[in-house]
Amino acid sequence: MPDIADRNKEAKILFGSTEELRVDMAEIKNPYSGKVASIYPICKEEDADRALKVAQYAYKKTSVSSLSQRIAWLEDVASKLRDYKEDFAQTITDEIGKPIKFARIEVERCAETIELTAKELINLTGETIPTDATASGRDAIAYYKRVPLGVVVCITPFNFPLNLVAHKIAPALGAGNSVVLKPTPEAPLTAYKLAKLFVDSKYAIKDALSVVYGDAEVGSTLVKSRIPRAVSFTGSVPVGNIITKQAGIKKVALELGGNAATFVDKDADIATAAQKCAFGAFYNSGQVCISLQRIYVHEDVYDEFAAHMAKETSKLKVGSPYDEDTFMGPLINEESKHRAKSWVASAKDEGAIVAAGGEEIDGIFPPTVMTNVTDDMKIICEEIFAPIVSLVSVPDYGSAIKKINESPYGLQYSIFSNSLKTVKRFIDDAEAGGVVVNDIPTVRFDIQPYGGSKLSGVGREGPKWALEEFTEIKSVVIFE
């Protein structure tokens, strides 16, 4: 395990001392060791206002910057990110306890997200319009183009503290906007280091990116302000509701909660499905919006699947996030661990059975499989955000899809089946932003559109679609 004290010293150098900044500082402790991982300045409402005004002024430069400069900017950041891949991975593990092998994957994905955005910028085009297509029209040169919005506010979560920042700021800056980023308070140094790559790039546009740290009041100041033309938020439904009410007339993109589910049909490869489901349920300690939480299994293969699921779960190594072979480390904090315990205790009181896990392992809440779960149990109705998955027996596809769609969320669902007819039905029937066939709903490729329906949010991420979110159409008509 690396000496986190040394990394904290680095944080003090990056952020400056309390005397230099003349602001209060807060500490982030590693969820596994309890040692200080980083420190950060606690910003206030006036700091948020100042950042917005800086961004507003910077937009005068970003809006007229060349596309070639912005593409070079993104490509430069992606290249530098790979140069410092191990440092970024260690910082992620230090701050949020993500196993180091998955932290490295996140760094690589982040670089890919930025590169994909740079490539997609070339396709951010308009088209010509035939104004004489109707009898009331007349001949003219008409077209539309996409233009930047102005100032964009980006608010990001802890579970992917690097890549989810990139999914917002790369397309926002690439499209010619200026950005104020409010990253998760759980991983301030991770976000800072990425922002620093953008700011220090030789292609950077001065003051185009600002970072502010703070609580709900700082967030509200950013959202309520008339300066930003868009707010992009990833987080919980309650906070998403508040943002929607506070934002006023501006673009709002929300990637909110989920209650991801899958259906395992009787003709599926049961062993393979169980292996994949164990990964999807417990990856990142279940702290993923599309973490597999509900598994509906055809009654003919329920017992077989449950046995395989318990077996696969027992194979997962739980422990220090710094060990190369650790699959799952700690939850983000003690509050999350206590909440996970309460979910299990409540389900047991209601008649559910713990088939695997359920008890702490060296202070870590383990991968937990619950069986004998029914529709009315709290554990299956709400988003858990912990390494807990529930198995429910169903008589047929119709029953499964009905139960899956009863959730107020609709981010991603999946199905394991070898029946093309059933798969086609599922694709049409599933009330979600994304559908996965013969794999877990936790699958996400950064190049694809990503977002949900119902309470899971509005708008889409993924470089191509985020660029549309962060631009608007300007219509042009020219007469001779």
Image (cartoon, rainbow, N blue to C red):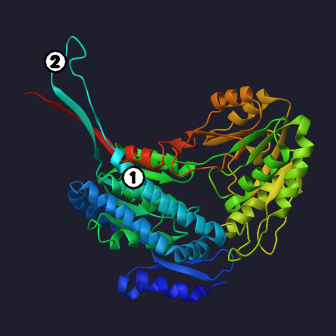
Q: Is residue 227 left or right of residue 109?
A: left
The crowd level at tag 1 (other Cα within 10 Å; few <14, some 14-19, many 20+) is some
Q: Quadrant of the C terminus?
A: top left
The disc at residue 315 is none
- The foreground one among 195 and 180 is 195
> Viewer-nearest of labels 1 and 2?
1
Q: Residue at label 2?
A: 138
Q: Residue at x 53, y 45 (%)?
A: 450
Which comes sooner in the sequence, label 1 or label 2?
A: 1
Task: Reply above or below: 365 against 140.
Answer: below
Where residue 257 appears, as percent x and y from the top left, is: 60, 48
Decide if residue 101 is in sight here.
Answer: yes
Decide if residue 406 is in sight here.
Answer: no
Q: Residue at x 73, y 66 (%)?
A: 327
**Amino acid at the residue labelled 1:** Lys
- The foreground one among 56 and 143 is 143
The disc at residue 119 is 1
**Amino acid at the residue labelled 2:** Arg
The crowd level at tag 2 (other Cα within 10 Å; few <14, some 14-19, many 20+) is few
